[in-house]
């Protein structure tokens, strides 16, 4: 958690129905019973609708129809079941029509689900912050997470103290004086596990209460004058986490205690972004860029010992530091909290692709805090993050969006904006096989290979242009076009009041070196059609040409090539 902010208390189906597409109805809801499915699992979807007699669902894989399901509506609900092929990882789209007794389509709604070997293959990471004895939103929390396909959740500040994680009694006040209950923590873990959502406990690599430091003053990390580094005045002391140090041994024992006495699924480790260097009690220099990867590896070995291959270790690279050192370490994904100077929307893409390269294509999770009322900002930021093959930690508590590094200060997404927010999560699950899993960032040359004629596309910053982000797979390329035309600023977290100017029927040309077999596009922007749309195309002298029907915020174009070419 960023040091300066923690101080403030501390997201082939072309749907035609007799030539017309039915209206999407936000009152129709599709709820999967799991955040993801293991190979061999049966998918169970509950469809809720206020009217109708039958539901019919079409399941797709990318642009290919897979199967059709149907079930009667009884008391406003219908249950759909299907066992997908065992291939994983694989994301599926599902589009549901609600029919009346005569077979007329009353409403349409879409969702998605995926088959993964492990949640960390596609870590749609969320958060929880309410562990009070009076916690009353447990069922809505699970529904919200399942609807958004959240498959891992960080329990933020669940612990008794930073240095003493499990409380001595069920009821306790945490280090910031919040009334907490360990029974609530355990109930939430159990609840998430019913939906195959991993529960990850927040911890800090070097933070200890001032009272604990007073008892162990030779365990601290000191500045050049011999004063212990602190976070806040006499609030949190920074301890020496060097492998083999007393604090290091103590904290790892605390991790073992957590894993032995709870059913948490691993360890999430935080830092504060500073200090980066210091001295131990004997005056020996400490470089946290060396200490942090070593500590990650120690934690990962402990997690593997207690949880086996299912266990997960995550570490926060605050401000993208020290990503060079920690990305190759034994963390299961690169988790990065974004702070200045990474202010431009395209900085998010640069951070992601750099971490993917350094981490040998491990998944990347960004924590980038945007107030929910800044709808244009989070739509653009999510488009960049997700098109780059990464994930955005931003929700978990029902209706919540993280807007502050102290997670309990989250904001509430306006009800009118929630359908659009949900579409991003459905979209990345539905199209994960061309956006994230099994793909890599394409070369700079491939980013320059696409043209929209007179529309500006080149530049370092995002402002006032269409930005291409290109991902590559074995026999395809994914060209995500992100629309920043007429956006008033390039800062992802500066208030933006004017959205991008849409493009319609836009001619696209693309240099290709392989035989093209198909071109299709999809977008999370329009409720009416999030399915894959085939595009007529031509290829002449190595130039692929086609017409993109529309670009609002983000349109994803997939170019499929002849196998093995």
Image (cartoon, helix red, strand yellow):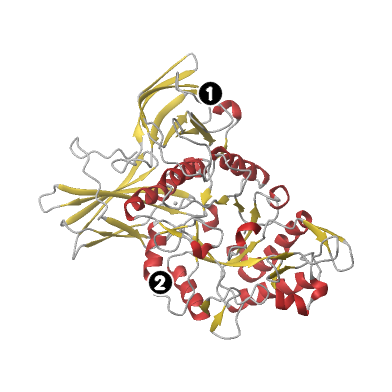
Q: Which residue is mark 1?
A: 449
Q: Which residue is mark 2?
A: 138
Single out the residue that lies furthest toward the top: 541
* Closest to the observer, 274 or 391: 274
Percent across and percent down for residue 428 are: 44, 47
Q: How many residues crowd around disc 1 within 10 Å: few (fewer than 14), some, or many (20 or more)? A: some
Displayed quadrant of residue 540: top left
Q: Residue at x 37, y 31 (%)?
A: 502
Q: Is residue 368 visible?
A: yes
* Closest to the observer, 500 or 47: 500
Q: Give the left or right position of residue 500, taking residue 105 as reference.
A: right
Q: Residue at x 34, y 42 (%)?
A: 530
Q: Give the left or right position of residue 364, taking residue 28 as reference.
A: right
Q: In the structure shown, which secondary structural element does the residue marked by tag 1 occupy?
A: loop
Percent across and percent down for residue 59 are: 33, 48
Single out the residue that lies furthest toward the left: 102
Q: How many residues crowd around disc 2 within 10 Å: few (fewer than 14), some, or many (20 or more)? A: some
Which of the marked residues, 2 or 1, is nearer the chain's N terminus? 2
* Closest to the observer, 225 or 106: 225
Q: Is residue 118 visible?
A: no
Q: In the structure shown, which secondary structural element does the residue marked by tag 2 occupy?
A: helix
Number of numbered discs: 2
Picture layout, residue 262 above or below residue 478? below
* Closest to the observer, 223 or 254: 223
Single out the residue that lies furthest toward the front: 233
């Amino acid at each position: 958690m960023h040091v300066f902010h923690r101080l403030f208390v501390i997201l082939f189906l072309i749907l035609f129905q007799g030539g017309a597409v039915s209206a999407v109805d936000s009152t129709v809801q599709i709820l999967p019973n799991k955040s993801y499915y293991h190979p061999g699992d049966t998918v169970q979807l509950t469809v809720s609708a206020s009217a109708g007699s039958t539901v019919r669902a079409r399941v797709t894989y990318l642009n290919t129809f897979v199967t059709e399901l149907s079930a009667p509506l009884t008391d406003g609900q219908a249950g759909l079941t299907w066992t997908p092929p065992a291939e994983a990882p694989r994301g599926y789209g599902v589009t549901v029509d609600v029919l009346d007794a005569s077979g007329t389509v009353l409403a349409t709604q879409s969702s998605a689900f995926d088959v993964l070997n492990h949640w960390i293959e596609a870590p749609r990471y969320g958060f929880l912050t309410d562990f009070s004895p009076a916690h009353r939103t447990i069922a809505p929390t699970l529904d919200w997470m399942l609807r958004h396909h959240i498959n891992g959740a960080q329990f933020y500040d669940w612990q008794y103290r930073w240095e003493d994680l499990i409380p001595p009694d069920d009821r306790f006040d945490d280090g910031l004086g919040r009334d907490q209950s360990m029974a609530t923590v355990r109930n939430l873990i159990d609840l998430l596990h019913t939906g195959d959502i991993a529960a990850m406990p927040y911890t800090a690599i070097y933070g200890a209460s001032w009272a604990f430091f007073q008892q162990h003053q030779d365990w601290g990390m000191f500045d050049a004058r011999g004063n212990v580094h602190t976070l806040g005045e006499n609030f949190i002391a920074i301890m020496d986490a060097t492998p083999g140090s007393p604090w290091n041994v103590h904290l790892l024992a605390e991790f073992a205690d957590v894993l032995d006495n709870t059913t948490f699924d691993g360890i999430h480790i935080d830092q504060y972004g500073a200090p980066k260097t210091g001295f131990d009690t004997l005056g020996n220099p400490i470089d946290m860029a060396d200490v942090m990867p070593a500590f990650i590896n120690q934690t990962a070995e402990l997690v593997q010992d207690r949880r086996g291959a299912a266990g997960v270790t995550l570490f926060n690279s605050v401000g993208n530091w020290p990503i060079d050192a920690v990305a190759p370490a034994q963390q299961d994904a690169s988790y990065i909290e974004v702070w200045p100077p990474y202010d431009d929307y395209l900085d998010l893409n640069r951070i992601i692709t750099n971490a993917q390269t350094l981490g040998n294509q491990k998944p990347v999770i960004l924590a980038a805090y945007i107030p929910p009322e800044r709808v244009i900002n989070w739509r653009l930021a999510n488009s960049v993050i997700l098109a780059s093959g990464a994930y955005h930690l931003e929700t978990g508590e029902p209706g919540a969006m993280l807007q502050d590094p102290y997670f309990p200060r989250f904001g509430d997404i306006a009800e009118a904006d929630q359908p659009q927010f949900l579409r991003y999560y459905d979209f990345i699950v539905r199209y994960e096989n061309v956006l994230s899993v099994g793909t890599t960032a394409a070369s700079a040359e491939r980013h320059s290979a696409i043209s929209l004629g007179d529309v500006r596309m080149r530049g370092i910053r995002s402002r006032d242009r269409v930005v291409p982000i290109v991902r590559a797979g074995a026999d395809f390329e994914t060209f995500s076009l992100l629309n920043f035309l007429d956006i008033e600023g390039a800062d992802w977290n500066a208030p933006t009041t004017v959205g991008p100017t849409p493009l319609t029927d836009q001619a696209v040309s693309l240099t290709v070196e392989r035989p093209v077999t198909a071109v299709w596009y999809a977008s999370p922007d329009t409720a009416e059609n999030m399915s894959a749309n085939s595009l007529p195309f031509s290829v002449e002298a190595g130039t692929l040409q086609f017409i993109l029907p529309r670009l609002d915020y983000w349109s994803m174009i997939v170019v499929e090539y002849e196998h093995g070419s």
